Image: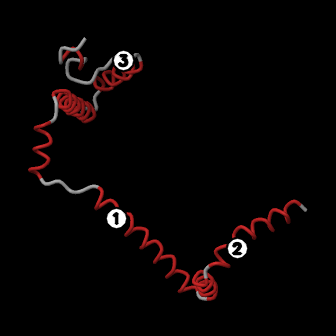
Amino acid sequence: DSLSLFLRRRRRRMSFIWEASPLWRTIVRSTRDSRPLFFTFIASTFGASTLLWYGTQKFTNPQLDAHAVAKLRAKSGLDARVVSDVNKQRLGVLLKEFSQRDGASLEKQEKRWRDALDGRTTGDKDGTTKRHFGWK
């Protein structure tokens, strides 16, 4: 009994678009009867949403040329440059350790994981990024 009541209420809520839009009724009837038209409708809605996404991304995130990127980097502060340098060094060390697959590098990786879990940063060649840049 409660299931039939739920379904009746649901039908009433979902019938608004059916009653208000003759175009929607035509689409539903056409796609119900024709499988190729059904897949065409799916492809067109997917294509329209993809175009909307692409247009939004294109107009809200303009592409910067090399000159504009260089200008932005020149205006960046010391903190941003230090963070960038540290990240480059850490990535280089990580890739170097990954390429060396001997027993020593496995022990070093274990040490790095233990230190990271203890809250110590061990991201560059001497073991401590903060000490390398004079931070305490």
Q: Hey, what amino acid is under mark 3? A: Asp
Q: Which mark is residue 115?
A: 3
Across and down, in percent, residue 135 comes to: 22, 14
Depth-wise, is mark 1 or mark 3 nearer the camera?
1
State whether residue 71 is above or below residue 106. below
Residue extending furthest right? 1
Q: Quadrant of the C terminus?
A: top left
Q: Do the residues labelled 3 and 2 touch (CB within 8 Å)?
A: no
Q: Do the residues labelled 2 and 1 touch (CB within 8 Å)?
A: no
Q: Hey, what amino acid is under mark 1? A: Tyr
Mark 2 neighbour density, 10 Å: few (under 14) some (14–19) many (20 or more)? few
Q: Is residue 51 left or right of residue 22?
A: left
Instruction: Say which element carries label 2.
Output: helix
- Give the mark nearer the N terminus: 1 vs 3: 1
Identify the residue under disc 1.
Answer: 54
- Give the mark nearer the N terminus: 3 vs 2: 2
Across and down, in percent, residue 33 comes to: 63, 88
State whether residue 16 is above or below residue 78. below
Between residue 33 and residue 18, name the one nearer to us.
18
